[in-house]
Image (cartoon, helix red, strand yellow):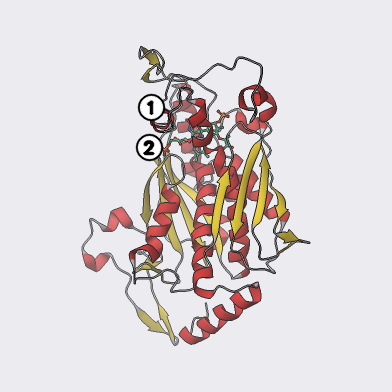
Amino acid sequence: MALTLITAGESHGPGLTCIVDGLPAGLELDRDSINRDMQRRQLGHGRGGRMKIEKDGAEVTSGVRHGRTLGSAIALRVDNRDYKNWEERMNPWPVEADVPEVHLPRPGHADLVGAWKYNQTDIRNVLERASARETAARVAGGALCKAFLSALGVEVRSHVVQIGSVHAPEPATLTLGDFDAIDEDPVRCLDKAASKAMVGHINQQRKANESIGGVFEVVAFGLVPGLGSHVSWETRLDGRLAMAICSIQAVKGVSIGDAWDVAGRPGSQAHDEIFYEDEHYARHTNHSGGLEGGMTTGDPLLVRGAMKPLPTLTKPLQSVDIATHEPAQALRERTDSCTVPAAGVVGEAMVAHVLASAYIDKFGGDHIDDVRGALDAYRTRIGWTS
Ligand SMILES: Cc1cc2nc3c(=O)[nH]c(=O)nc-3n(C[C@H](O)[C@H](O)[C@H](O)COP(=O)(O)O)c2cc1C
Ligand SMILES: C=C(O[C@@H]1CC(C(=O)O)=C[C@@H](OP(=O)(O)O)[C@H]1O)C(=O)O
């Protein structure tokens, strides 16, 4: 059975919901690690005033008993603390008050196209759901997927490799230990000098009324080879990962391994040669980012997401009033200026969901012990001991 993760909720409504269905019974969950991920998503230099209001945490309302999954759908509820400031404007039921409509679409947000498509005169009916507030629910659900992966020896992390025009140096190799202190860094970058330059860049751009994009990388350690498949396009793991990463609000590009770089290299420098050492297969490089033929190789998975600068600008762009068709400046709202570090945490949740689904597709069982048993049998068959 597939592992599904769906979210519901508007940015300034009463709250968000995430439902994860398809995890096996008997999986141990830890409330603190779910909430830690939710708090990590709120961090990062460049966030706006909203993050001072919210203190995200997930309430489990079904599918878990005494800290273990039951095999049924798990529902998670995340409150929007800001709702108390928006109750009149966002109440699910009619209110007496005269609530003003939003008529000024922001270039780069879902505002204009969403209003056309859903036949809305009030852009708020679009922007509330288009908002990346929704990613708080994804991270709550992703934390369950991460717990499942951890039980199978897989750990998913992320770091920031570019903010605006500032690039971090490319790391030669990455180990799990490299990420131990990543959340203490203001932009979740592994290189101290680059981090300092990134913070300076955000400050400078913010002062100039600009927003800033960048690139994050998600890394998964401890994967077994053979997740995904080469046999049909929709089972290729690279395709599934690209969709999951590109589904994050404002992400416009996805790369796997050396992607854009290998496109310009000769073949002899693009692939990872195969060796047999100490009775095991080995690679000395990981240009492929841990994927060949749509399947994991067993090397660390390396997936990047490129984020455009956020569309809400403190000095708004040219737009049109959708009620009058007169030229106007786009909606000016409270906004983040840079959220690449947060998007990395959302990327972890999305990658965790794709990988957890792939483990369930290949080793699925009703109880976590069934999954472990099938995984162990497969590891023995292919001689995979790492
Ligand atoms: C964590 C996170 C926070 C975001 N915060 C803002 C924000 O404060 N202001 C804004 O204009 N866009 C913000 N965005 C991006 C918008 O949600 C996004 O640009 C919008 O959905 C349109 O992007 P799209 O064309 O990729 O859908 C944020 C994105 C993420 C991932
Ligand atoms: C609320 C979150 O992100 C929001 C995403 C967002 C957008 O347009 O995507 C706009 C901002 O919302 P607000 O207008 O309330 O300040 C961000 O704060 C969050 O990440 O939890």
Q: Position of residue 56 (x, y in %)?
A: 67, 41
Kindly identify the amino acid type of the residue bearing the numbered disc 2. Ser
Q: Earlier in the sequence, mark 1 or mark 2?
A: 1
Nearer to me, 173 or 107:
107
User: Residue 54, how many percent across, how many down?
Assistant: 66, 35
Above or below, 214 relative to 208 = below
Q: Quadrant of residue 302?
A: bottom left
Pointer 2: what residue?
Answer: 165
Image position, residue 361 (x, y; %): 50, 70
Residue type at numbered disc 1: Pro
Q: Which mark is nearer the camera, 1 or 2?
A: 1
Q: What secondary structure is marked by label 2?
A: loop
Q: Is residue 173 above or below residue 79?
A: below
Seen as rendered, the residue at the extreme right is: 66
Relative to 262, residue 1 above or below: below
Q: Is residue 184 visible?
A: no
Q: Residue at x 42, y 32 (%)?
A: 114
Q: Is residue 357 visible?
A: yes
The residue lying at 62 percent from left, 77 percent from top is: 370
Q: Which residue is depicted at the point 52% across and 22% down?
A: 333
Cα distance, mark 1 to mark 2? 22 Å
Residue 297: name its quadrant. Answer: bottom left
Circles 1, 2 touching at the beta carbon (< 8 Å): no
The response on whether ligand 1 sits within 8 Å of label 2 is no
Q: Position of residue 189 (x, y in %)?
A: 51, 46
Helix, strand or loop at label 1? It is: loop
On screen, residue 225 versus residue 50, left or right, reads left
Disc 1 crowd, CA 10 A, few/some/many (<14, 14-19, 20+): some
Q: Residue at label 1?
A: 107
Front one among 102 and 54: 102
